[in-house]
Amino acid sequence: MKRIAKFHKVSFERYLKDWENLFGDEPRDVIEKNYNDIQLPKRATKGSAGYDFFSPQHFSLEPGRTITIPTGIRVEMEEGWVLKCYPRSGLGFKFRLQLNNTVGIIDSDYFYSDNEGHIFVKITNDSNEGKIVNVNKGVAFVQGIFVEYGITYDDDVSEERNGGFGSTTK
């Protein structure tokens, strides 16, 4: 098995800024506690392909509702690899919990972005059975799988990333 990446927490300042942008003012000590409790992603078993991401906060989602979660996580990985993120299988199966971009793609150069490569998860409860999704703080809700990729022989891209969502097309 190749070892090609390492998870890190973003700085508290980054997490605080992103949290406040999404949820508005909340007592700093609450945000700081959430930050201090963040767990780095890990595999559940030696045969697991996916690294579980743990929710930094409790949330409930009624059918048709969406939430964006700042995970507090960034990932440093070798060039030629990508982290693909999906909902945890059980949540997708039981509640039709879906990532809004279908599959989250974390490129190797995202780690060096101005936002420290902070990984966000935007999810929707797409249940057509009226089920409410409840995810407690510290519970795995998303999984990421590292995948090696190739490029074409005539690829000559030299641009560098400096941003998050949609920044590679600007």
Image (spheres, grey):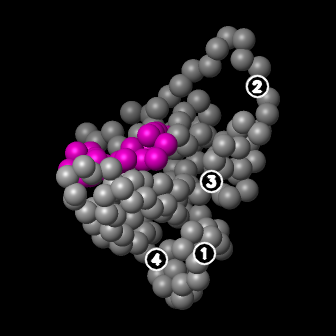
- N-terminal label among 1 and 3: 1
Q: Nearer the viewer, residue 86 or 76?
A: 86
Q: Is residue 92 magenta?
A: yes
- Tell me residue 138's x, y (percent): 34, 68
Q: Is residue 88 left or right of residue 153?
A: left
- Spatial separation of the CA atoms under disc 4 and disc 3: 19 Å
Which residue carries the number 3 mark? Answer: 117
Which residue carries the number 4 mark? Answer: 34
Which amino acid does the dot numbered 1 rest on? Answer: Glu
- Tell me residue 158's x, y (percent): 79, 29
- Spatial separation of the CA atoms under disc 1 and disc 2: 35 Å
Which numbered dot is residue 124? none
Which amino acid does the dot numbered 2 rest on? Answer: Val
- Spatial separation of the CA atoms under disc 1 and disc 3: 17 Å
- The residue lying at 39 percent from left, 53 percent from top is 124
Please tell me whether mark 1 sits on a helix, a strand or a loop.
Answer: helix
Which residue carries the number 2 mark? Answer: 157
- Tell me residue 90's x, y (percent): 23, 49
Please tell me whether mark 2 sits on a helix, a strand or a loop.
Answer: loop
- N-terminal label among 1 and 4: 1
> Counting other residues with Cα less than 10 Å from the Cα at mark 3, is it few (<14), some (14-19), or many (20 or more)?
many
**Image: magenta residue range:** 83-103
Discs 1, 2 touching: Cβ within 8 Å: no
Instruction: Specify whether residue 45 is in view.
Output: no
Q: Nearer the viewer, residue 57 or 33?
A: 57
Which residue carries the number 1 mark? Answer: 20
Residue lying at the far right in this picture: please name it.
158
| Quadrant in which residue 16 is drawn | bottom right
Q: Is residue 85 left or right of residue 25?
A: left
